[in-house]
Image: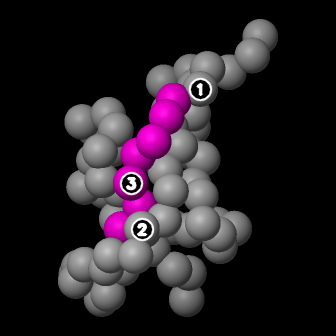
Amino acid sequence: MTAKALLEGGPDDLAGKLVPVVPPGKELKIPHRGGYEHYKMTARHEHSQEGQVTVYQWWERTEVAE
């Protein structure tokens, strides 16, 4: 079973979403609208429809280099 993360902050269409944590780690880099949204793991957990998940807080956006 793949670990899931609850996204907090960042773009409205990503905030509150559950996403797989692949590969497992302290940071997530999610492709989004021509760039990447970066999230860092917090010490907080929330209960979701898929059980207990770790909350990841948005911290920056980077653009895709052309």
Establish if 27 lies above or below 25: above
Q: Magenta-highlighted stretch: main secondary structure?
A: strand
| Disc 1: which residue | 62
Q: Is residue 30 left or right of residue 5?
A: right
CA gap between label 2 and label 3 equals 7 Å
The secondary structure type at the circle numbered 3 is strand
Q: Where is residue 54? Give x, y as percent.
A: 39, 75
Which quadrant is the C terminus positioned in? Answer: top right
Sequence-wise, the earlier of marks 3 and 1 is 3
Which residue ends up furthest to the right in the rendered image? 66
The colour style of the image is: one colour
Disc 2 or disc 1, which is closer to the eye?
A: 2
Q: Choose top left, top right, bottom left or bottom right for residue 4.
A: bottom left
The amino acid marked with disc number 3 is Gln
Residue at 61% across / 20% down in the picture?
Answer: 63
Asked if the residue under mark 3 is in contact with the one under mark 2, i.e. CB atoms within 8 Å, the reply is yes
The amino acid marked with disc number 1 is Thr
